[in-house]
Image: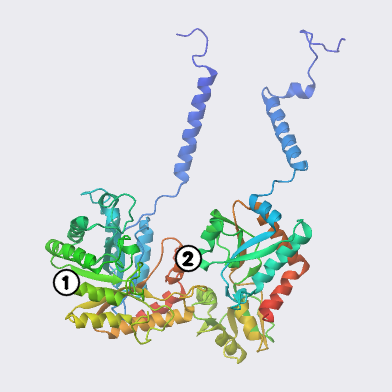
């Protein structure tokens, strides 16, 4: 077959676009196309399900979820002296095992608690004495080298507490020149001192958060920086106060698992996310932190 | 020779280009990297304080950056504390037998001096060459006591006129701190007897502190520890009196207020008074006491911790008690700052975070000590 403008060597003529390309450009373009198409294929195609980790496989088979806990921190976890645990963390674990039993496992899952001193929780987790730490554990960025942390299920940082009729205060910047009540030495105290010069806070120190909140109620201070636990405990018997805004400092509480347990982590995160979305977590806050049981 | 061909192959050119590119990248990196922080000793400072006995135990042993050493010590001064206790591990300084590396120790002492601080040096930590394989750094065989004595002599000679006080060992009444040899007051006394004359020979002005006992209610016969009151008496019984100038005391309050009365069956801050009584009973009333560790912890979960406000109140009260006690020369609380978080309850003993954020207790002590 003969082409128009046939080259003298008898080969097919190049297209104009290709002819205009600088030498060496074509391979680069081709390589880029291959990479783009390859990336799209790899990421676009449905992946086979990842193999569950050994912890999750064992949990699925035996139905036992082993948890490290230091039951000395109400309202998150405490023991009644007869071996019965109660608290927000216990309720959270109950939700996990119930959801796993319902959704993804053929066996019924139940929780087994391993009592461990708070300082020993990380070491015991790494030594395989349990599968996860659920013990009002604060998120710690420096620990992320050693363990995986779940999504936060509670923020224990201090809030601004003002009187019910205060409609002006939205953030700590709205408290310029005001009298701030703080528990001496607390995180709220540290925050207030950091901003004291900038906002000319008149700091009033108290030994206990309840004393600061009582001073707020009596009009001796204009705001208190304290955490939700202390506020709710006080508010149970003393009306007239409210929290505003978001925590001044974040102190997230999380669940920790070993780095060899990514499936377990994903399952824990799925439960926490679901609980946030469907209001179960909010109900637990109300039950354990606001109402007190 | 030129025959019209290029003298280098394409591969050689590529290699040269790669080398050129690497050199350019390295140059860019070198120019872009921040220069090392220039640290100078700075002008001589003095500590302004209303209580000249306030001290803290610093933790600069593992602090590598000079600017951090300087900043730590400057913050101690600014808090109003004229005293620091610092640890100088034998194994770090005399890593090889007879070879002394004073570089890091000099950094600490030079900066402390410049900040107007008085250094109480705690000595211990046996180098590898001076102990059996697989033993702990707190293990020192009696046959090696003279090696430690020689190190102490070298130390006090090197720091003559700059360091006035050295503590011999740490908490020897705890088995762990005594190299798991079994707690023996007689053994520790023998160590003192070996070190004391050699140190005095090197620097007659040096003041030797003994004890630094862990406050403990360990029952008789415990393999882990010996009750500190019992241990001190046994030290005297073994003849320790002639081999120390001051007693170092560890005074932890745990959950009790600073003024809780002392009792043999209680660990609290005023247990110091019971140790003092034993000194008096053994004819050592003229010797002073230095509290070289002590204080309270405000971890939210630790069973021996108190609330932050209590920690502040108790610490200030303790400093004040020390001011009143004419037999106490200095009162150094554990611990000013760690170089890195320990990730345990221990972090809640500190006054300043590893990244130099003062905790409220720092400001309260500063207010107490300087009126600021």
Colour treatment of the image: rainbow
Residue B344, disc = 2
Task: Give the quadrant of the C terminus of chain B.
Answer: bottom left
Secondary structure under the numbered disc 2 in the rendered image:
loop
On screen, residue B124 versus residue A3, left or right, reads left
Image coords of residue B349 (percent x, y) = 43, 71
On screen, residue A150 versus residue B264, left or right, reads right
Q: Residue at x 78, y 67 (%)?
A: A278
Vertical placement of residue B157 versus A206, above or below: above
Return the residue found at the far bottom: A218
| Marked residue nearer the N-terminal end (1 or 2) | 1
Q: Residue at x 62, y 90 (%)?
A: A217
Residue A29, disc = none
Q: Quadrant of residue B246?
A: bottom left
Task: Give the quadrant of the N terminus of chain B.
Answer: top left
On screen, residue A99 versus residue A178, left or right, reads right
Nearest the camera: B213 or B17? B213
Q: Which chain does tag 1 point to?
A: B
Residues indicated by labels 1 and 2 sit on the same polypeptide chain: yes
Residue count near mark 2 (Cα–Cα under 10 Å), binned few <14, some 14–19, many ≥20: few
Image coords of residue B128 (percent x, y) = 29, 50
Image coords of residue A112 (percent x, y) = 64, 64
Nearest the camera: A122 or B46? A122
Q: Where is mark 1, residue-wise?
A: B239
Q: Which chain does tag 2 point to?
A: B
Nearest the camera: B361 or A33? B361
């Amino acid at each position: 077959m003969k082409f128009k403008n046939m080259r003298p060597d008898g080969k097919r003529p190049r297209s104009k676009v290709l002819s205009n390309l600088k030498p060496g450009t074509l391979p680069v373009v081709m390589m880029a196309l291959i990479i783009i198409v390859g990336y799209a294929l790899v990421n676009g195609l449905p992946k086979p399900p990842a193999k569950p980790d050994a912890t999750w496989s064992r949990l699925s088979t035996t139905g036992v979820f082993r948890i490290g806990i230091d039951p000395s921190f109400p309202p998150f976890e405490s023991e009644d002296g007869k071996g019965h645990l109660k608290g927000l963390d216990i309720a959270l674990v109950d939700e996990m095992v119930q959801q796993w039993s319902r959704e993804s496992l053929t066996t019924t899952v139940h929780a087994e608690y391993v009592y461990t001193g708070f300082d020993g929780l990380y070491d015991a987790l790494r030594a395989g004495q349990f599968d996860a730490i659920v013990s009002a554990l604060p998120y710690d960025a420096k620990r992320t080298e050693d363990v995986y942390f779940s999504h936060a299920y509670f923020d224990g940082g201090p809030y601004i507490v003002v009187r019910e009729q205060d409609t002006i205060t939205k953030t700590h910047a709205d408290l310029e020149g005001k009298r701030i009540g703080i528990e001496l030495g607390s995180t709220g105290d540290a925050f207030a001192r950091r901003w004291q010069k900038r906002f000319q806070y008149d700091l009033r120190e108290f030994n206990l958060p309840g004393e600061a909140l009582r001073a707020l109620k009596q009009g001796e201070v204009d705001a208190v920086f304290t955490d939700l636990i202390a506020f709710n405990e006080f508010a149970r018997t003393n009306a007239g106060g409210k929290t505003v805004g978001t925590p001044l400092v974040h102190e997230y509480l999380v669940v920790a698992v070993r780095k060899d347990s990514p499936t377990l982590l994903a399952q824990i995160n799925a439960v926490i996310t679901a609980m946030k979305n469907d209001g179960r977590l909010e109900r637990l806050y109300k039950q354990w932190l606001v109402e007190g049981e | 020779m030129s025959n019209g061909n290029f003298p280098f192959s394409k591969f050689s050119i590529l290699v040269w280009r790669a080398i050129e590119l690497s050199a350019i990248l390295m140059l860019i990196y070198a120019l872009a990297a921040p220069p090392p922080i220039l640290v100078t000793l700075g002008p001589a400072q003095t500590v302004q304080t209303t209580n000249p006995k306030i001290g803290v135990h610093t933790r600069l042993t593992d602090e590598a950056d000079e600017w951090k050493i300087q900043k730590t010590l400057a913050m101690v001064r600014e808090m109003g504390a004229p005293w620091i206790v610092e640890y100088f591990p034998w194994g770090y300084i005399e890593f090889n037998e007879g070879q002394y590396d004073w570089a890091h120790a000099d950094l600490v002492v030079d900066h402390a001096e410049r900040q107007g601080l008085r250094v109480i040096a705690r000595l211990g930590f046996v180098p590898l060459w001076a102990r059996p394989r697989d033993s702990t750094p707190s293990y020192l065989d009696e046959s090696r006591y003279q090696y430690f004595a020689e190190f102490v002599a070298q130390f006090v000679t090197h720091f003559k006129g700059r360091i006035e006080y050295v503590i011999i060992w740490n908490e020897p009444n705890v088995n762990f701190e005594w190299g798991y040899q079994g707690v023996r007051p007689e053994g520790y006394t023998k160590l003192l007897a070996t070190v004391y004359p050699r140190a005095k020979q090197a620097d007659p002005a040096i003041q030797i502190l003994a004890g630094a006992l862990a406050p403990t209610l360990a029952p008789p016969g415990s393999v882990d520890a010996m009750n500190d009151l019992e241990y001190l008496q046994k030290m005297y019984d073994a003849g320790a009196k002639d081999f120390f100038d001051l007693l170092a005391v560890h005074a932890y309050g745990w959950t009790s207020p600073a003024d809780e009365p002392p009792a043999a069956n209680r660990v609290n801050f005023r247990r110091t008074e019971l140790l003092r009584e034993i000194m008096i009973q053994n004819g050592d009333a003229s010797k002073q006491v230095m509290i070289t560790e002590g204080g309270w912890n405000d971890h939210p979960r630790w069973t021996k911790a108190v609330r932050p406000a209590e920690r502040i109140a108790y610490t200030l009260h303790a400093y004040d008690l020390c001011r009143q006690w004419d037999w106490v020369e200095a009162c150094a609380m554990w611990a000013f700052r760690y170089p890195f978080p320990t990730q345990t309850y221990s972090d809640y003993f500190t006054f300043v975070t590893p990244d130099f954020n003062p905790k409220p207790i720092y400001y309260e002590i500063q207010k107490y000590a300087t009126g600021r």
